[in-house]
Amino acid sequence: MDSALIPEGVKRTSFPKFFLGMAVVGAVVLWGLIAVVLIWWKGLNQTNMNDYYGFALWIWADLAVIAVGGGAFFTGLLKYIFKVDELKNIINFAVIIGVICYSSALFILAIDVGQPLRSWFIFWHANVHSMLTEVAFCLSCYFAVLVIEFIPNVLENRQLNKVSFFHHLAHNMHGVMAVFAATGAFLSFFHQGSLGGVAGVMYGRPFAFREGLLIWPWTFFLFTWSAAAFGPCFTLLVTKITEAVTGKKLVSDKTVHLLAKISGWMITTYIIAKIIDTIYWATVTVPASGFTFSHFFSNNAFYGYWILFAEIVLCGVVPGLLLIYKPTRENSNLRLLAIILGVIGVCLNRWVMVLQVMAVPVMSFDTWALYIPSWQEVATTILPVAYGIMFIALAYRYLPVFPQEKELNYPAQPVVEGE
């Protein structure tokens, strides 16, 4: 029965081996679910958050997965709106990664809210003056858009596609997908931006506070820009990992090189804007707040000057240059290095905008406030990673995710005359 569900013309590992792998990952999911039950049952006292750290590991993970999930909206925008047809070979996988990232983000928020039974309050009793309300609405709506974009891929399952209704529904949904791609890009622009805006308007936290354009601080635009720049890196990285695990070539070099090139130029332009923003903040905003630049970087191992260098130079300038320069971009090892550094860079940016913001002392009697998450926080943060692995494994096994898999791995056998 299992083999009848596998896409036609391709090969998959035996079901017992597949089941064993899923069981191992499932054990990690179970560990995370135990932590979730403890948190929902006993409350947020299961965490190490305190008066300094009302936002901590969960919110960093939330912002990080939303950032790397940006590859979905940006790839969809390029494919359906700007008609970059070559990306049709990776768009299905980008959408799957987006579904995983955004469902994980919503799940993390459901844990962090403390009283999950009241989660619906944010929609029914919305605080219209809060950026987080706009984030919640856009996150929920964009997740719905991603699910709609994913449905045609599900309907193309070998058995489901035999049903005439599902076959025609998938075909018709592909025909109007540009509408959903445009809607997703619109929603993503605002929720990515508002996540940055939340940090940028924190007057009492001068490490995060930024000047801006009209009502929007610079971080509003930088968050959206960085998600579009580094999101494709994460898509390429997970594609590479999937190829390594399966032992197959799933996306052609032409498609990979194109997406890497686009990501490289986006990273380069973003990092130029980020450098300008940092210089302005250090020379204008910081002195105006009554602080010095050195005040925001500690001698401890967590928040020294190294973190600024790592985010901007090592994980920003370096991957940008590696990806825009053709010889290094088309070198598989250097390209892999670049996309790994890029993913680390955007996650590091979200880390400092959540954790370092809270750690920096802002009162004369304050000291640097360090934070170590509890095991419950770690388990619930790892949970979405394990869930994502299971999601990708199931999608790869039973859905035609990669249009080029057949031609790249199973060349047609020549027909011998007389046979």
Image (cartoon, rainbow, N blue to C red):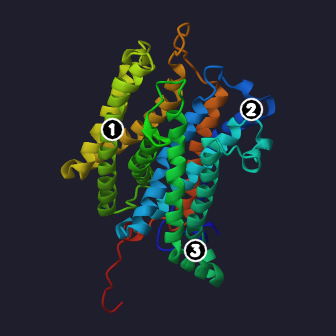
Closest to the camera, between mark 1 and mark 2, is: 1
Left or right of 327, for residue 396: right
The span from disc 1 to disc 3 (Cα, nearest Å) is: 42 Å
Determine if residue 333 is in view.
no
| Label 1–label 2 contact, CB within 8 A | no
The residue under label 1 is which amino acid type? Gly
Above or below, comparing residue 401 to residue 390 in the picture:
below
Q: Position of residue 48 (x, y in %)?
A: 65, 22
Left or right of 67, for residue 416: left
The residue under label 2 is which amino acid type? Ile
Mark 3 and mark 2 lie on one chain; the one further toward the N terminus is: 2
Depth check: 380 or 179 in front?
179
Local SS, label 3: loop
Left or right of 65, for residue 127: right
Direction left: furthest residue = 327
The span from disc 3 to disc 2 (Cα, nearest Å) is: 41 Å
Above or below, comparing residue 27 to residue 303 in the picture:
below
The residue under label 3 is which amino acid type? Arg
The answer to which quarter of the image holds residue 198 is: top right
Direction top: furthest residue = 365
Q: Position of residue 227 (x, y in %)?
A: 44, 47
Direction front: furthest residue = 214
* Residue designated by label 1: 316
| Tag shown at residue 183 | none
Above or below, comparing residue 249 to residue 131 in the picture:
below
Above or below, comparing residue 21 to residue 174 in the picture:
above
Quadrant location, the N terminus: bottom right
* Residue designated by label 3: 158
Local SS, label 2: helix
